[in-house]
Amino acid sequence: MDTGQNIESTLADLTGLGLDRVRESQDEVLTAGIHRMVMLICAPDERIGGGGEKSRLDA
Amino acid sequence: MTPDALADLSGTARADLSPPGLPRHRLSERDFDALAAANADATAIERLREAESSYRRMVLRAVLDLLRRDSAARGPLPPPDAAWDLLVEAERRAPAQIARLIACPQIGAWAAHMVRRLGGDLHDDAPLWVDAGQLHALAASAAIEAGIGASLLVPMRNGAVHLPVLGHALLPARQPWDTAWVRIPDRPASPAVTTFSPERADPPPSTKLAEIVSRNSSVSVRMAAKHGAPTPEHRGSWRARPALTAVCRGETLAVGLEDADPYRLVGRTTAPARLAPADVDRWTAMLHSAWDLVVAEHRKTARELSALIATLAPLPRAAPFRSFSGSTGDAFGGVMLSEPENATQFAATLVHELAHFKLGAVMHLFDLTDFSSSRLGYTPWRDDPRPLRGILHGIYAYFHVTDFWRRQRLSTSGGEAMLAHFEFAFWRDQTLQTARTTRASAGLTDLGRRFLDGVLVTLEPWCSEPVPFLAGDLAEIMARDHLALWRAHHLRPPSALVAELARAWVDGRTAPRTAVGAAGPEILAPCPDARDLDGRACLARLWLLDRERFRQAARTGPESVVAGTTSADCALVSGDRTLARRLYLTELATEPGRISSWVGLGLTDREHGALADRPDLALAVSSAVEATAGRRPEPSELAAWLAPAVISGNDETGRAPDEHHTAARPADWLPGSAEPDGAGA
């Protein structure tokens, strides 16, 4: 049911942040976002799976 | 990457200059539900693109932090902060171009590759500094885009220097891993300087943007040219990345044809594979045709594609009806795909991958599944057992594919229309079944269930839409075929049940139905060799699309068109079930363990239906009887004997033979109740 609310992500919003600020920031929201991002990257890529020819269908 | 290493990330930053409390990304419930139902507006799509922009900046920051801590990663190259300094300056001077550069899918693929490699989760044959040095190549591209004068040392792989988005140079290589200088003169930044646009009547003259120098050879970096033709020079050549632009009724699709970036393919680094100008022309023409089709029949999808897709990584043409495509969450907006057979197939592939982009972005934002879930399950679109997140991706992708064919079947005629009806019926029913089963299974979060609710709200009404009998009937048989083959390859029936049935057969008793009912679930034992389980479905597609080509294949041997298929399969898909039955029995007489023949025989009529409903059990019992009595049961006799025990709801239902298959779909109990069997995996 749509309650008119927003669903908040752990991902920091860096759309207004230049690369200099991205490099310097130790903001805890950014740190939490990086942790989530690294966890996602280091989890098995379950979209492809198997590797090689088994990835012919990627769903 | 270890938890400690993870905790240390971002702890090496310099003094914090940013205001406290960065905002987080948000999505309204309305947009979330609309995305799930494939009914999102442009604003919601833009939210996803923005989230991916943040995700990309985060992964670059993570790579920088990891490189700062690992001096071995530097090799002969300057420190990573030198490259970042240049990126910062370039962004100040040309923010739009640098945003576009960073958004390049292959930058994301490279960064994720680095996180895995520096975290010890991945091995690559290239020295670490060669991989890490791509940050300097990115900075070189940024400096060229922004017109900043600079000289940078960048890595060279087997003579190839790749500058992201711009192109690559090939130079004589004395050793596999080397360095080259990129010398960039000062000049004003221009949005059009590195991208060739076919809309311009006269391509601008080739302007020298930079020079790449290695030992005693050099090449000039020039702006993109038509066809992506390389510019040969003394002892080397530069080749700008081909840029394809299709315009139809005011809708534009602009993509880079990425045939050289070392990070363009999923899961491995790859040498350049330059397309010839004629190949680029062929891809261009096909993209124009596909875009015309998408804009004409699927306007909303066209706008989403225009917003999200950035590159195509071309691969050689695949076998008929077995086209290849792939994408990952690392490389948002990037698709790798085999050369399309036709515009319709190209369009369907783009629609498929678009769904992956959208769901990938949603899953970067929110957890739709429980990460601790290790269960595997059946999906009708893959030959291997799939984890829950993969199943969710498949549901969403084939939900979009179903929508594509639902519309497409109304705009074509003849064989193409019959094929479209088949695809619609096949994917509609299979996606619905899988979505319902997954919705009821363990492992989804509340948001995950909400997302599937959105899919089902749109998908369920489509199931009452009529489909021509021929296409619908074949779709049902082919769905049953794939499920049966998957069962036979990946499931093991309980050994006690197999032994009891084999004893009953040898003793001349009826198959004990109660034993089948009381037996525990099958054991999931993934078979790594299971592949191309869609052979008969490919033949069915050919039969619906092009009857003459099908007949020719049947005459000369279908194996040459669809690998792994036989004349019996041709007879089955074309409706001659008597001939198919005879041919399958002949196949089994010479090759008693051929799984495809067992299942094919089971699809020919109700009397043999047990072989398609429980091929795992039939094969196991056949082998057990042979081990005990010295000879296998005759397949038809075994099918008739097994039927009362494994098939319920018989004659009194009045249903057609193909409606009698009542064996549980693996998705009915997977991923809800089965764990992979380690011994068999």
Image: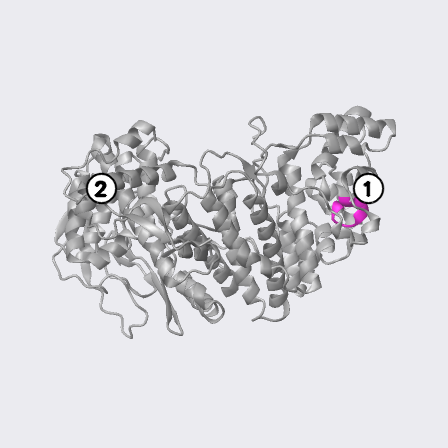
Relative to B426, B512 lies left or right: right
Whether residue A44 is visible here, answered yes or no, is: yes
Q: Between marks 1 and 2, how big is the CA–CA gap?
A: 68 Å
> Mark 2: few, some, or many residues within 10 Å (few <14, many ≥20)?
many
Residue B590 placement (x, y as % from top left): 76, 39
Q: Tag 2's secondary structure? A: strand
What span is in magenta?
B602-609
Q: Which mark is residue B291?
A: none
- The residue lying at 77 percent from left, 56 percent from top is B576
Any part of residue B214 in sight: no
Q: Quadrant of the N terminus of chain B?
A: top left
| Residue B369 percent coordinates (x, y) | 46, 41
Q: Residue at x 83, y 30 (%)?
A: B505
The residue tagged 2 is B179
Mark 1 Cα shell of 10 Å, populated few (<14), some (14-19), many (≥20):
some
N-terminal of the pair, mark 1 or mark 2, is: 2
Mark 1 secondary-structure assignment: helix
Which SS type dominates the magenta stretch?
Answer: helix
Residue in view at x 67 percent, y 48 percent:
B481
Percent x, y of residue B577: 78, 54
Nearer mark to the viewer, of 1 and 2: 1
From the viewer's perspective, tell me whether residue B338 is left or right of residue B495. left
Q: In the image as oriented, which residue stretches furthest toward the front?
A: A3
Chain ID of residue with mark 1: B
Look at the image and say whether residue B176 sits in the magenta stretch.
no
Q: Amino acid at mark 1?
A: Ser
Instruction: Give the residue at the far right of this rendering.
Output: B508
Q: Which residue is mark 1?
A: B636
Chain letter belonging to callout 2: B
